[in-house]
Amino acid sequence: MRVSLNIISIIGIVLLCSCERFIEVEIPNQEPRLVLNALLEQNDTLKVYLTKSRSVLEGREYDGFESVRNAIVSLRDESGQVFTFDPVDRSLPWMDNYVYELPNPGLLEGKSYEIIAEASGFNTVNSFQTLPESVKIKEVNFTDLGEDPNFTSQNIYEVSVKFDDLPGSNYYEISGNMLGKSFYVNEGDTMFYFYSSELYPNPVNQALKKDHMMRQVLLFQDVYLNGEDSEVTFRTRFPRDVDIEITINLSHVSEAYYRYYDTADLQRYNQGDILSQPVLVYNNIRQGIGIFKSRNTNQKTFNLRVEEN
């Protein structure tokens, strides 16, 4: 019996070996390209992050990308005037933080701007974006819906943001945060309590809800709006017995901004799910990879205190 088993085992190994096949795959040319990431908005300083791409066979999945130093990065307006970014190195021994910065040259709404990056050993890359018009927040209403059964120290609020949707096709983002402070006396000592959180908006209109969004924002097209006198309502939670300063941001964003975050967040959301459909992240950098996006944000701040019942 032992001899028979040994013979069967040998035959099995031979059969398995005979089924093994090696498949040669020709990988297309993967020369490194410039990867540019920049946001055009009315900030004090514009920033451009410039790295180089790498092959799928190079490094590990979560390895950082190498910054491209000593590049020439510039912004050109519609009149042809060119503004050059300055390289700024804030790297630490354990973290690469190299960025190109430009003091705001006086960006104008509705005007188009070209970003250009040149570096030795790479193709010159460029992209265009128009700074969206500002959309003002007309009114924000807060409605107390009572105690949250899952968080008994907080109340659920319905927040309605009213604004005028501009003519044409538009994209918007609503976000916000809260800062709070409170105090109590413990055995004669005054103890201060500080509270900080994003709003975590949950839209009442579920057509605006995107489960794959990694950031705590509402990102949507104006197909769900009513033109003038548009209103977006969402629910969130506020702590009780805390003096809260609430900031609401309404951003009019470019199509590139919308498509980039919609696809990039969906790709991360599907990561590791072998049954999900592959997602191609939106890219608008010519001769390279990355995103040049724009937004124009209107902001309002409110004070609120939710009292104990």
Image (spheres, rainbow, N blue to C red):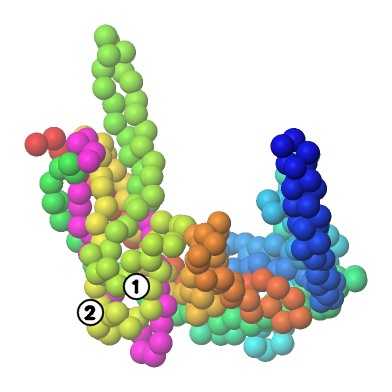
Residue positioned 50% across, 67% down in the render:
276
Does any portion of residue 59 appear in the rendered image? no
Name the amino acid, label 2: Asp
| 132 up-or-down from 199: above or below | below
Residue 36: mark in rendering: none
Residue positioned 31% across, 18% down in the render:
190
- Where are the magenta residues, as a range? 150-176
Task: Identify the residue under disc 2.
Answer: 229
Q: Residues within 10 Å of mark 1 (few under 14, many from 20)?
A: some
Instruction: Determine the residue located farthest toward the left in the rendered image.
Output: 309
x, y percentage for residue 133? 45, 80
Judged from the image, the secondary structure of the residue bearing numbered disc 2 is loop
Does any portion of residue 219 appear in the rendered image? yes
| 241 up-or-down from 58: above or below | above
Cα separation between marks 2 and 1: 11 Å
Name the amino acid, label 1: Lys
